[in-house]
Amino acid sequence: MLILGVSELWCRKCNHETGNSTCELCGAVTEPVIPTEVCWCDSCNIPVIREVNDIHLTNCPICNNKIHYLCADLRPVFPEERLLFEILLDTPFKYKECSVWANANRYYINGKPKAVTSKLYHKYNSEYIIEKLRGYKNENTYDVFKKYISLFIHANTQRVRLIIAEAHEFIRKEAEKYPITSVVISFSGGKDSTVSADLAVKALSEPSLVHIFGNTTLEMPTTYEYAERFRKSNPKAIFRIAVNREQDFAKVCEDIGPPARMMRWCCSMFKTGPITRIFNRYYRDKNILTFYGIRRCESVSRSKYNRVEDNAESVKIQKQKVAAPIFYWTDLEVWLYIFSEGIDFNDGYRLGYDRIGCWLCPNGNARSEFLTSIYMPEQYKKWHDFLLDFATRIGKPDPDVYVDTGKWKARQGGNGVKAAEDVKIRYTNCTTEEHARIYRLNRIMNDEFLNMLTPFGIVSKELGRKLLNEVIVLDERTNTPIISIAPFGHSDYDYAVKVKTMNVANHDDLQRMVGYQVRKFNACRKCLKCESLCRFGAISISSGEYHIDSKKCKHCKMCVTAKYLDGGCLMDKYLKTKEHS
């Protein structure tokens, strides 16, 4: 059996990568993970996929002429993108009769490379390009494109059969461990999740699988259009939409600044969090298997994933095990499957986007930004104006350069952002009691704050000294008091609380975790990360407040452990500054 990707070893029984010839977990003999490459037939003008160093596939399966190495991967260039490219070169329809493909910033015209730099995207203003596209639209046909795609499918028939067979086997093997009602598909509207969904439905012969669509409210218009088409063409599929209706993206940006590559708070708040709520609502204590469209070659970060993930450090939503049927597929193999199976897909790819996601994602490249300025001009201008205003507010000397060069995407921390004050844990050691600290709060100690102490044990108002408004936290196993909390008057703080630890082996560790909850109380922006982190569904954001259900909480302390949530609060990552304390 062939598994695709890079030259490593794989245990089919345990579904994990290893460097050993035998699996360290089960002892099974491991198999090589064999990479592929793209070759080109100059006679047919099409790409041919083959395994690296395959001595048997040296000729085109159609015309039998010699094929030669072209590149590592490719994607098709649809007529819409080809015309845009030609307009930028001042040569409309020059390549209309050609076989056009692309990889990163390089186009291949009949197999001949033509590099494109980002300077080309600044050659004309968007109004000029939009007018040209509109004028040439009716002449831009699909006849030649369809001819080459048909040849491409024919030449790679054996390849698509191979990858389908392997994916189906993988899906059935993973799904057999779960009742079909606990198998779900993560549906983003992009090509990879589309293919994974189609593979899962066909492999399991189950058209009524649950599809969960994470509507971030920031999807491209073509994604919403495609999602609607998908629902209509798959009437038996259960289609659940996960959306955060309590937060407004623009208002959050005003508060804590725009998301950046290393600070994508938007994912937790508008995607992972809402999907977690769907899981908690419909699956409660059930374990879930999610098939999703992650591919290893998409990015450096994804190259570190495993094809199957279920450990707490790797899985964003703790109630699920995730499996990626197309983990080792290349871009070209994904498109081969789409064309071969005749699957509908997101029209954003026709426009030239190589990845479909949030239209303003900081991970987007220069071409995607350029395309957005052409196909979503109003949204693009509004976002660009906000970024300029934000750059001015945080004191950037040249806001235009900061925005137009993409430096805002590399932003780290909350420098210049007022909200950054909320993540700083301010405290002083109590001078009259040992193991006691006075913490600054940015509002009065209330039931929400006391509820945040639930992970440490049983929170009891009854046992505390009434005159001091003291509350005691008991160890859940021994009923021994371990924390005392009471409001405290402090000359430097408007609001403060005294926290004393007792009857524990390590007072500093417990105070550190209490400090995390202080930070959470002060800085919580309802990002929903904690909801996703809790495997027992004990944490929720309800009526604008953070709440821990004491009946569901197992006191595992994952939500206050830096291993799972650095700083105890995701806002610490996004808002901390150099002088952070």
Image (spheres, grey):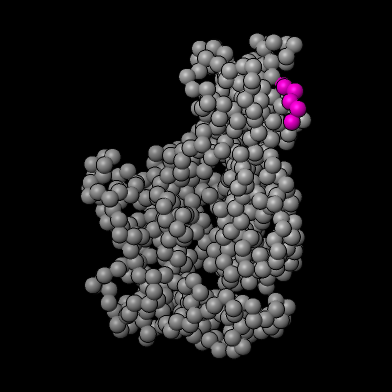
Residue 264 appears in the rendering? no
Q: Is residue 502 above or below residue 389?
A: above
The dominant secondary structure in magenta is: loop
428 or 571: nearer the eye? 428
Q: Classify 134 as above or below 188.
A: below
Q: Residue at left 70%, top 61%?
A: 396
Residue found at the far front of this picture: 431
**Image coordinates for residue 1, horizontal then vertical, percent:** 28, 56
Q: Is residue 334 above or below residue 496?
A: below
Which residue is at a point 69% across and 42% down the rendered structure image? 421
Q: Which residues are magenta?
A: 487-492
In the picture, the quarter occupied by the C terminus is top right
Residue 509 in the image: state x and y as whole percent. 51, 27
Q: In terms of depth relative to the viewer, which is nearer, 581 or 155? A: 581
Residue at image x 59%, y 89%? 91
491 is within the stretch colored magenta: yes
Q: In which quadrant of the rendered view does residue 430 lie?
A: top right
- x%, y% of residue 4? 34, 59
Residue 235 placed where, x, y %?
Answer: 59, 52
